[in-house]
Image (cartoon, helix red, strand yellow):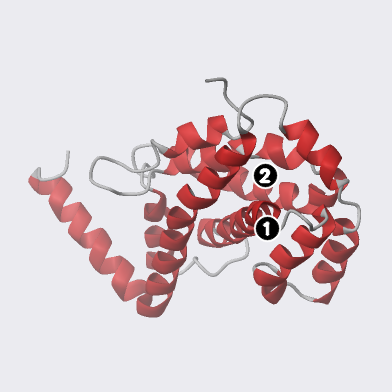
Amino acid sequence: MEGTVFTPSLEGMQHIRSPQGEMLTKPFLDVCKLILPVIDKFGTAMALVKRDIGRNTSRLEKKYQSDPFRYNFLYNMVKEEYECKSAKGSTSCTNGILWLTRAMDFIVELFHNLLAHPDWSVTDACTDAYGKTLRKFHGWIASSSFTVAMKLAPDRKKFMEVITCKGDVRADMEKFCLTFPPYLEENHKFLLEVSFFGCYFASAIIESLSSSINSGIIT
């Protein structure tokens, strides 16, 4: 069966976890980037979201590429930053993972709205998704910018025609909405836990990992 615009992301999700079930950095970031061509179809309405996703994936990729072995697991970046007390900085990888996850929450909710409400315009779907995800984290300026941008969303019929050039796009959109959220929920859960326990939590994990590596348990 011929693939759809969602096929690359769906295939990428199969590689997000290690055999032990841990979140792998590069595959997770790849999935986030692979959905960008779909976001492009929304035009100017999604420019701000696309910029945020691109900026945060670039930040995390740069960190990963500095030491692929050390940062093979996504959460190692967070643990290290809590150990160094730099996790709360605006340019930290912890902050990057948080905002990337929030942006992807919005994208998932938007696609869900398009599936669940065939009578809604794309602007309606965007506005509702924004209200349920990103809006509570934005200040007045950011919120106003998003509100204006979403009014520039394309006509629903034309948008669906553009992304339905091949394959069963509705089925793949639904699969994306079902398959990707668990990874996002895991990110939120981990970030909440590490924020609560702070550097003591991170330090204990890093010490445990180092001990395992030194003893040959982890190779």
Residue name at image x 61 percent, y 29 percent: 4
Residue name at image x 53 percent, y 39 percent: 31
Is the residue marked by circle 2 packed among few (<14), some (14-19), or many (20+) residues within 10 Å?
some
Q: In the image, which is nearer the foreground, mark 1 or mark 2?
A: 1
Percent x, y of residue 11: 47, 32
Residue 41 in view: no
Work out which quarter of the rendered image holds the C terminus and state it.
top left
Q: CA distance from mark 1 to mark 2?
A: 23 Å
Percent x, y of residue 118: 74, 53
Query: Circle 1 is placed at which residue position?
Result: 113
Residue 166, above or below 205: above
Residue furthest front in the image: 119
Identify the amino acid type marked 1: Asn
Residue 151, above or below 2: below
In the picture, measured across the screen, residue 119 lies left or right of residue 12, that is right
Q: Which mark is residue 29?
A: none
Residue 134, above or below 70: below
Query: Circle 2 is placed at which residue position?
Result: 54
Q: Secondary structure at mark 1?
A: helix
Q: Earlier in the sequence, mark 1 or mark 2?
A: 2
In the picture, measured across the screen, residue 176 lies left or right of residue 125, that is left
Nearer to the camera, 39 or 124: 124
Nearer to the camera, 201 or 32: 32
Residue furthest top in the image: 2
Is the residue marked by circle 1 packed among few (<14), some (14-19), or many (20+) residues within 10 Å?
some
Identify the amino acid type marked 2: Gly
